[in-house]
């Protein structure tokens, strides 16, 4: 008998709170189980009509310093790490209630979101999971940076970076949710930045909640965080986490092999635009377990 993949949601609601990295304000969220084909939606319970904002690419309005979604005049910001967690754990349907415009940054990684979701439990639903099944190469290049996807037997992603910086240098990592543990391999990797980046953000009125508690901060070739790095190659692991968050906005998982080199939110989003336009290069359908 053929075996298919089914959609998943949470067993029970779970809540957490923290501060927004840009606003510096305390925010609480409640992750609630949602029915089949609901997808991931954010609900602004602090606004009068509690509007919903679907976590879909068409709702992305800004990617400069965080991924911002907007629907019917309501916005929700800095959603990328929670979205990456849903993708990494294979979760399709969740209602995220939030009482502010910006998601809590937690410790700058997906570690706490992952442990809250594991605590809530993950449950298989009765509807089949639909995929973007990649049939042909789709790619985008910008100088030496690129993002591309090719047909593949399941889902795999490989990311690489090159920084002219001794501490980071060249790093590369792959993730395949069928073979690797998202929790162990990816979820603990934190956002990183250089001291001068933080200074510039603060001048723009951003990064008000940013600190050594929620980012790896580098200055003069040294990590300023007392406990150092969580993985030797924490930088590329976080890049991969961000990529999972960006590609999650397709609204369906991909059956294909994604490779990114030196990409960031902007190039990833340009790639998604191209991907959605090249309709001959993929089809959407459930897939059989191999
Ligand atoms: Zn990030």
Image: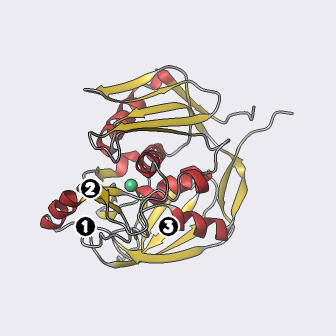
Residue at screen point 59% across, 36% down: 155
Please name whichever residue, 24 or 103, is drawn nearer the observer in this view of the structure. Answer: 24
Ligand 1 in which quarter:
bottom left
User: Circle 1 sits on which residue?
Assistant: 207
- How far is disc 1 from disc 3 in space, using C-alphas? 23 Å
Rendering coords of residue 147 (x, y %) = 39, 31
Residue 253 tag number:
none
Please name whichever residue, 215 or 240, is drawn nearer the observer in this view of the structure. Answer: 215
SS at circle 2: loop
Q: Is mark 1 within 8 Å of ligand 1?
A: no
Q: Which of marks 2 and 3 is nearer the N terminus?
A: 2
Rendering coords of residue 164 (x, y %) = 26, 39
User: Circle 2 sits on which residue?
Assistant: 65
Residue at screen point 32% across, 64% down: 224
* Residue 117 position by quadrant: bottom right
- How far is disc 2 from disc 3 in space, using C-alphas? 21 Å
**Circle 1 or circle 3, nearest the eye:** 1
**Circle 2 or circle 3, nearest the eye:** 2
Rendering coords of residue 72 (x, y %) = 32, 60
Q: Do the residues labelled 1 and 2 touch (CB within 8 Å)?
A: yes
User: Circle 3 sits on which residue?
Assistant: 96
Q: Which of marks 1 and 2 is nearer the N terminus?
A: 2
Residue 145 higher or lower than 45, as above or below: above
Crowdedness near tag 2: few (<14), some (14–19) or many (≥20) residues, C-alpha within 10 Å: few
């Amino acid at each position: 008998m053929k075996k298919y993949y089914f959609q998943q949601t949470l067993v029970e609601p779970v809540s957490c709170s923290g501060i927004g990295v840009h606003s510096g304000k305390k925010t609480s969220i409640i992750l609630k189980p949602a029915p089949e084909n609901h997808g991931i939606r954010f609900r602004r319970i602090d606004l009068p009509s509690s509007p919903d904002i679907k976590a879909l690419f068409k709702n992305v309005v800004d990617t400069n310093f965080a991924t911002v979604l907007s629907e019917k005049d309501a916005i929700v910001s800095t959603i990328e790490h929670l979205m990456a967690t849903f993708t990494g754990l294979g979760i399709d349907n969740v209602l995220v209630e939030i009482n502010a415009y910006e998601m809590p940054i937690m410790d700058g990684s997906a570690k706490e979101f992952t442990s809250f979701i594991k605590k809530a439990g993950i449950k298989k639903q009765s509807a089949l999971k639909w995929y973007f099944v990649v049939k042909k190469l789709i790619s985008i290049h910008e100088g030496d940076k690129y993002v591309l996807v090719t047909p593949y037997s399941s889902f795999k992603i490989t990311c690489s970076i090159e920084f002219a910086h001794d501490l980071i240098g060249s790093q590369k990592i792959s993730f395949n949710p069928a073979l690797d543990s998202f929790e162990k391999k990816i979820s603990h990797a934190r956002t990183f930045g250089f001291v001068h980046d933080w200074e510039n953000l603060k001048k723009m009125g951003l990064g008000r909640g940013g600190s050594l508690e929620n980012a790896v901060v580098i200055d003069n070739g040294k990590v300023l965080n007392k406990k150092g790095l969580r993985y030797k190659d924490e930088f590329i692991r976080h890049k991969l986490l961000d990529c999972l968050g960006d590609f999650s906005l397709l609204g369906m998982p991909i059956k294909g092999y994604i490779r990114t080199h030196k990409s960031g939110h902007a190039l990833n989003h340009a790639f998604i635009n191209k991907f959605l336009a090249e309709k001959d290069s993929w089809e959407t359908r459930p897939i059989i377990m191999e």
